Image (spheres, grey):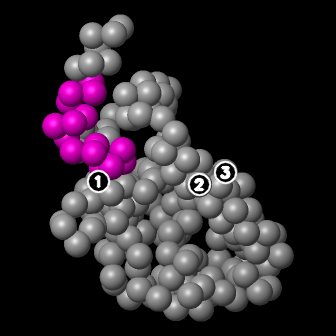
């Protein structure tokens, strides 16, 4: 459930220690619940999570949030906006204390053009992300929420991170009230 990309994390560790690229990369720390990116904001930087967990979500016109993903170590943030020169399509908030590598959009594009390992790793990350999102959408179409919830709870248990009911409901695209009903029904069948 929490996505990570250890290959990109290792590459960033190497690049931030390399004399040629280290000056272009800085670190930033955030507390839990602090927002890193706001939807519709113009971004100047791209971020790669060094440590911690974030939630990436869209706020709809009806003021409801829908969580797209939970992202952890090595995950990339702001890349689409840097490539397409657009405003942020979603918000990103720290769930746990967070440390991110930070570099400018210009530097990100420069790394894509001049560091083949970086380019390849980013392409692979983007392909994996599209695949995951497609699989999540397919699951939501093919299975009932009652069938999805036990799988989700098992994934949470294996990753040993606690999420609020609000976060779980937003991830599933349902209300907290509906989630509570599903949890009650799940307990009754166990």
Looking at the picture, tell me which residue is in the foreground, 137 or 85. 137
Q: At 29% from the left edge and 14% from the top edge, which residue is drawn?
A: 187
Q: Which segment is the magenta one? A: 169-183
Q: Secondary structure at mark 2?
A: helix
Q: Position of residue 96 (x, y in %)?
A: 35, 48
Q: CA distance from mark 1 to mark 2?
A: 29 Å
Q: Secondary structure at mark 3?
A: helix
Asked whether residue 177 is drawn in magenta, I would say: yes
Rendered image: mark on residue 32: 1
Q: CA distance from mark 2 to mark 3?
A: 22 Å
In terms of image quadrants, where is residue 186? Answer: top left
Circle 3 is placed at which residue position?
A: 6
Q: At 62% from the left edge and 61% from the top edge, which residue is drawn?
A: 130
Label 1 packing within 10 angstroms: few (<14), some (14-19), many (20+): some
- Who comes first in sequence, dot 2 or dot 3? 3
Q: CA distance from mark 3 to mark 1?
A: 22 Å
Q: Secondary structure at mark 1?
A: loop
């Amino acid at each position: 459930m929490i996505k990570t990309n250890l290959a990109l994390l290792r590459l960033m560790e190497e690049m931030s220690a390399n004399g040629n690229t280290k000056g272009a990369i800085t670190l930033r720390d955030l507390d839990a619940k602090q927002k890193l990116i706001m939807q519709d904001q113009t971004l100047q930087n791209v971020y790669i999570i060094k440590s911690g967990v974030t939630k990436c979500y869209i706020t709809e016109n009806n003021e409801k949030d829908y969580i797209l993903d939970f992202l952890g170590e090595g995950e990339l943030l702001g890349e689409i906006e840097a490539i397409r020169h657009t405003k942020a399509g979603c918000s990103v908030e720290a769930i746990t204390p967070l440390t991110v590598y930070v570099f400018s959009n210009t530097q990100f594009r420069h790394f894509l053009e001049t560091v083949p390992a970086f380019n390849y790793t980013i392409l692979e990350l983007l392909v994996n992300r599209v695949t995951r999102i497609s699989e999540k959408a397919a699951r939501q179409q093919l299975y009932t929420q009652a069938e999805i919830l036990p799988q989700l709870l098992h994934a949470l248990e294996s990753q040993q991170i606690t999420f609020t009911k609000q976060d779980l409901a937003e991830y599933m695209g349902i209300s907290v009230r509906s989630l509570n009903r599903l949890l009650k029904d799940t307990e009754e069948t166990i």
